[in-house]
Structure formats: C-alpha cells, structure tokens
Image: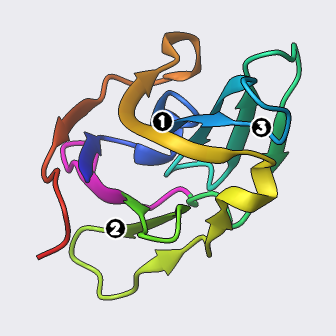
Amino acid sequence: GVRMSAKKAHLIRDGCLLGAAFVGTRAEPGQDTVITVFFSPVSGRVFVMFAEELHGLVTQPMPALAERAADDTDLEEIEAFLCLSADDAVSFCRRRVGEDRVEWSGKIPWAFLGARAKHKFTSLNFQIDQLKVPAEVSVTWAGPQP
C-alpha cells in the first residue's frame, strides 16, 4: 500500500500509479507475454498495457476524487492498496485518511487478460507530467495479507 500527501490531492491526477506486472504464458506453447495493470488512486482509473501492443485499455471503476475545500496549509492524504489474490486476480482500493469509507475496484481476473501468470511483480510508478502539485508518496505496507 501507499500513502500520498499533497495540499490539493485531486491535482495529483494520474501522476502516481500502483502497478502489477504479470509475466505469463499464452495459449500458444512457449509464447511468454507481459501484461501490466496500473491503478491511479486519484483519478480512479485502471490502465491495462500489453507488451506487444502500442495501445492498452482504460476503465473507470471508481470516480475521480473531488476537490476538497481545505485550508491551503492542510495536507490531504490518500491511502491506496493493490491486492493480488491466490486466484491470480488483481484489485485495488483507496480511502482518504481520516474517513471510514473504503472504495474497491472489484477483481480483474488473470483469465480476462488471456494468459496464465508465472510471475507477478508490483511497482510504484510516476508520470511527472500529470503531477500538478508537489506530492509526497511513501510505501506504507508490502507483503502477504496477515
């Protein structure tokens, strides 16, 4: 999981992405592929990129975070998590720090992506051109569920 902090968190946009790369085998024997799924906690969008393709898929499982009326000195904080399940599905969740409400993306099953996962790698990615405010991002948790 990660924690993001900024004076106006909605302006982080797609500047910070949680990712999961799946290295797998397609139905054709010996055909390895890499499929990467990215989650933008602020915009609520999920991006799916295929190694062999120039274009990917985009979906909006959660609404974008709205601007908050806050004092300019206050930092807004968002926590986001990427979950890889035993059945090779990936899901994402987010919450604003200080609120009880947690939003979940729902599961994206590996079978949907058209390959069988042999290896899984998680990542934290940045798109600097999307950041409209300075932001602090830290990894708060990594590992299997307790």
Q: Amino acid at mark 1?
A: Leu
* Residue 60 seen anywhere in this rendered image of the structure: no
Q: Is residue 44 magenta?
A: no
Determine crowd level at label 3: few under 14, some 14-19, many 20+ residues with C-alpha closer than 10 A: some
The part of the image, by quadrant, that contains residue 37 is top right
Give the residue drawn at x 58%, y 60%: 66
Give the residue drawn at x 67%, y 65%: 109
- Judged by depth in the image, the label closer to the viewer, 2 or 1, is 1
**Numbered disc 2: secondary structure:** strand
Give the residue drawn at x 69%, y 25%: 33
- Judged by depth in the image, the label closer to the viewer, 3 or 2, is 3
Give the answer, above or below, for where 65 lies relative to 47: below
Can you tell which mark lies on residue 38?
none
To which residue does mark 3 refer? 26
Cβ–Cβ under 8 Å for marks 2 and 1: no
Position of residue 91 measured from the top left corner of the image (x, y, whole percent): 52, 65
Magenta span covers which residues?
A: 67-81
| Magenta stretch: dominant secondary structure | loop
Q: Is residue 77 magenta?
A: yes
**Numbered disc 3: secondary structure:** loop
Q: Is residue 94 left or right of residue 33?
A: left
Give the residue drawn at x 82%, y 15%: 52
Can you tell which mark lies on residue 17?
1
Earlier in the chain: of badge 1 and badge 3, it is: 1
Q: Amino acid at mark 3?
A: Arg
To which residue does mark 2 refer? 96
In the displayed orientation, state which residue is furthest to the front: 29
Closer to the camera, 82 or 126?
82
